[in-house]
Amino acid sequence: MSAITITDAAHDYLADLLSKQNTPGIGIRVFITQPGTQYAETCIAYCKPGEEKPDDTALGLKSFTAYIDAISEPFLEAAVVDYASDRMGGQLTIKAPNAKVPMVGEDSPLNERINYYLQTEINPGLASHGGQVNLVDVVEDGVAVLQFGGGCQGCGQVDLTLKDGVERTLLERIPELKAVRDVTDHTQKENAYY
C-alpha cells in the first residue's frame, strides 16, 4: 500500500482530465523535485504508457494508474492529493507534509547520507547541464567514490565541479567524510591526493 492518498474527488477530477487526453492507458506520475530540501515541490504529470520509470511504484486506482517516483516515495509518506471545488471551479491540492523533511539522520549509514545529498542537492544542479553523479562506493576510511554520467562525462570542467561543488557540499554536510574521488581515479588507489 502506498504512502500517498488520492481522494475520490481528486481521482474523479484526474480521471476526467485523463479521459480528455485521447491516450489509452494514460495515467499520472507523482514526483517531488529536490525532495528533502526546502525547495521541494510536489508535482503531478501526465504519464503516457511507456513514460513511467522502471522503479516507479504503480498504484492502481479505479480509472487509471498513478506511478509514484521511487526517490520521491519516502517523502510522499502521508501525502494527500485532494480536489476542492469552489466558485471558480475548483483546484487540485497536494499536501505532502514530509516533502521537505530530510530522510537521513546523523545515524544513517554513510552511503545513504551521501546518496541523499547527491539526489537532493547535487544532481538537481547538474541536471541543468544534462549531468548526474552517483555513488559507487565508500572506500578506505571515509572516501566517497563517485561516478559522473550524462553531460559530466568527458567534460573538461568535471574536476572543477567535483572538487568545488560536489566535494565541498558533501564534506560540509557529512563531517566524517574525508574526500571525494571520481571513479576514473581507480588506478590511483595508492596515495591519491597526497
Image (cartoon, rainbow, N blue to C red):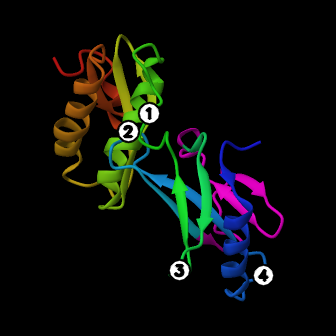
Who comes first in sequence, dot 1 or dot 3? 3
Q: Disc 1 versus disc 4: distance between alpha carbons?
A: 37 Å
For residue 159, the mark is none
Q: Going 56% across and 69% down the picture, which residue do you hit?
A: 45
Q: Which residue is labeled 1 in the image?
A: 115
Give the farthest residue toward the right: 62
Name the residue nearer the viewer: 144 or 2.
2
Q: Disc 2 versus disc 3: distance between alpha carbons?
A: 43 Å
- Relative to 112, 21 lies left or right: right
Q: Disc 1 versus disc 3: distance between alpha carbons?
A: 45 Å
Who comes first in sequence, dot 1 or dot 4? 4
Query: Which of the two discs, 1 and 3, sits closer to the camera?
Result: 3
Q: Going 61% across and 66% down the picture, which residue do you hit?
A: 83
Vertical placement of residue 17 versus 140, above or below: below
Asked if the residue under mark 4 is in contact with the one under mark 3, i.e. CB atoms within 8 Å, the reply is no
Q: Which residue is labeled 4 in the image?
A: 24
Query: Which of the two discs, 3 and 4, sits closer to the camera?
Result: 3
Q: Which residue is labeled 3 in the image?
A: 87
- Relative to 102, 64 lies left or right: right
Label 2 Cα crowd, 10 Å radius (few <14 / some 14-19 / many 20+): many
Q: Which residues are magenta?
A: 46-75
Q: Going 42% across and 26% down the picture, which residue do you hit?
A: 113
Q: Find numbered disc 4 in the image and state the secondary structure of the residue it sits on.
A: loop
Label 4 Cα crowd, 10 Å radius (few <14 / some 14-19 / many 20+): few
